[in-house]
Image (cartoon, rainbow, N blue to C red):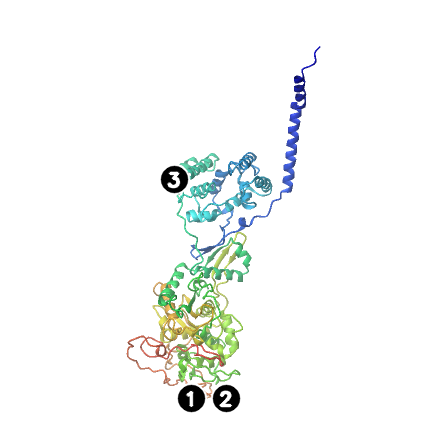
Amino acid sequence: MGRPDKGKAKKRGIRRLFTWKKLLGTFLVFCLLGMGALYVVYLLVPVPSANAEATMQSNIYKYSNGKILARTGKINREIVGLEKIPLPVQKAFVAAENKTFYKDNGVDIKGTTRAAWNTITGKGKQGGSTITQQYVKNFYLSQDQTATRKLKEMVIAIKVDRKSSKSEILAGYINTSYYGRSAYGIQAAARSYYGVDATQLTTEQGAYLASLLQAPNQYDWTSASTTGRKLVEERWNYVLDNMVGEGWLSASERAGMKFPVPHKPKPAPGMEGQTGYIVEAANQELMRQGVSEEDIKAGGWTITLNIDEKKQKDLVKAVDKQLEAKLDRKGDKKQATVQAGATSVDPKTGAVVAMYGGVGATEHWMSNATRRDYQPASTFKPIVLASAVDNRAVTQDGRKIGLGTVYDGTSQRPVVGSPIAFAPENEDDDSYGPVTVQKATNSSINSVYAQMIVDVTPAKAKKTALALGMKDGADFPESPAISLGTMGASTLDMAGAYATLDNHGKKVPPTLVKTAAHKDRTVQGAKAVGDQVISREAADTATRAMMGVVQSGSGFRAAGDYEAAGKTGTSENNRSAWFVGYTPELVTAVGLFGEDAKGNQVTLTDTINPGRANGGRTPAQIWGDYTERALNGGSDAAFDLETEGGAPDGTLPDPTPTTEAPETEEPTEEPTTASPDPTAPPTSTATTPPQPTSDPVTTPPEPTQEPTETEEPTSPPTSIQPPDAGGGPDANSTGRPPR
């Protein structure tokens, strides 16, 4: 017999080696190894912490009417709960991306494998992921298109699906996805494309936003090409048809739907102008209420402010007209030093309805509305008067202090009864002789209020100031000099203090934030109106005194078709000029501050006008202009005051007595502290003192031109009054006296 064919023997050997049983066994081994490897990967790949961008949100700041004032943060996102998103809108996202979402285990093996293979082989970036996988990619991983990331995505998706509900996953997906127009999350997208909150989205609008996720920039209708518009409309129809197929939308309702063309994009509000000042002040208020700076920076807050959009614009217009239009900031270095600040408050609620921080937050970063490094000057005097009445203080000879009490208005007259020597100069060193407290308030006579604070005691006057809302500090000693407003204060502080006076002595803390809502917590604004901190008589007496300032005194430029009370103030060396006042409905503090390019305090003299820039001029004009606008031209509201009072021009009503002399003493014609000698005993004053010779009652000719600062009338031209003379330096200070 011949030898077997070698070729045939070799083939039989290969067949024995690769039998179907062996191949099947090998396949099963590889499958087991693969499954084991996947299990090991499943065990080794943890669910990581959320990536920084996934949790980063913007803060939304709104006017009191709900309109957005500003949005802050690098990521334009505001996370909203799924329960706030209409159910049809939720279903639209599922219909667009993953119809089996509610049934699957979080992974599409086939789609993921195909996408990974196409990516590896260079066929381009591919999708193929479930909603759960896309959520995992957005929330936990990066946007890298690599096989490694795809594998991690799949493993983590399985784990997330096991530990989280479908609602939690869908909410995370909708809130972390990118929609174009720099909008992350459905809330930002709803506002950007349709100008509504996510809660107000229609089914049609929701289907469009769901369609966007496939190609956000290409599918933005307002910038898309003809092809892009065709594709997104086809995608939109696909989403709605899927909803009908899944039973989430009726065919009849679907038939009546039209494509919802989105709005044109608008730039997000920035920090320019007054916005930056207001946002920073709101943040500071939130921190005072216990919200940490870290929490605020993390974002996710919707902060509704008390700022009234109209009144805010009114305030800016008033400053622009009465100040900025008259300055040459670029061409005149002195005029460039003028800074304005203002705060306006509702005295019934404490709501800060308007705030002016300066020329612009991106140009002058420090807010002139909240800074406390300038003296409020004579705007502090009504607080001294309120303290005197509240504490039932008496003069050195025992007479109760009220609007009709007569004091010696001699300039540089040393105070009596103080261990600290103090003899302030009146404005222009004018001496007034015997004057009532009302007249001293109208003309802001330093010597009278210096003696009054000694009579009430500086400690009690300071206590009253703090109770009204002013802030303590190293520059607020218990000395006679504080009668002239030598401490630091902001327009926010002074608006709050005067709001309490306007509210008959019940505390009114200025509140900028109405509510601050976060997905984890809600912060309400500070308590609006507090307890009675001074008596109604004291508050109303201060109001009546300041009504005289507006009607017949240094603040006449603030008068208008409304009932008003207010006080002027000009600090030492004319570094600040104020008008703080109120109507029954609105309290506003306006301040001008001199500040050079290096941040040093400088004089306002010869800046906005030749000579002194006192509180009765530009600040009062800004106040009046704004108040008229804010009250829509005027108001019939009247103060409801419970107090006796003198005439607004400072004269004493006859026959009602305005001073109380001790029953055991015979009243005389001398003022209570007329003697310049601090050691001389005080004498009582007659109940009907003579009219001071420095206060003429004759009517002068109508002025033909604007008077100079030293001739400035303090009332409408029916009589010439002494110039505004408020505020004052300490006994050892130099320079012109404050007013």
Q: Amino acid at mark 2?
A: Thr
Name the mark nearer the viewer: 2 or 1.
2
- Amino acid bearing label 1: Thr
- The residue beneath circle 2 is 679
Q: Is residue 6 left or right of residue 551?
A: right
Secondary structure beneath label 2: loop
> In what quadrant of the picture does the N terminus appear?
top right
Residue neighbourhood size for the residue with mark 1, other residues' Cα within 10 Å, grouped as few (<14), some (14–19), many (≥20)? some
Please report whichever mark, 3 or 2, sits nearer to the chain's N-terminal start.
Answer: 3
Question: 130 or 31: nearer the eye?
Answer: 31
> Residue 185: x percent and y percent?
49, 47
Q: Nearer the viewer, residue 428 or 20?
A: 20
Amino acid at the residue labelled 3: Thr
- Mark 3 = which residue? 226
Q: Position of residue 141 (x, y in %)?
A: 56, 45
Q: Of tags 1 and 3, which is closer to the observer?
A: 3
Q: How much space separates mark 3 and mark 2, taking CA atoms?
A: 95 Å
Q: Looking at the rendering, in which quadrant would you find the C terminus?
A: bottom left
* Corner quadrant of residue 24: top right
Q: What is the C-alpha distance between the residues marked 1 and 3?
A: 97 Å
* Crowd around label 2: few <14 · some 14–19 · many ≥20 (10 Å): few
Residue 19 or residue 200, whichever sits in front: 19
Instruction: Residue under label 1, please give it.
Output: 668
Residue 420 placed where, x, y %? 52, 82
| Residue occupying image coordinates x 44% and y 45% | 201
Position of 132 relative to 730 (above/below): above
Q: Secondary structure at mark 1?
A: loop
Residue 380 seen from this side: yes
- Residue 246 shown left or right of residue 556 in the figure: right
Residue 635 visible, this orientation = no
Helix, strand or loop for disc 3: helix
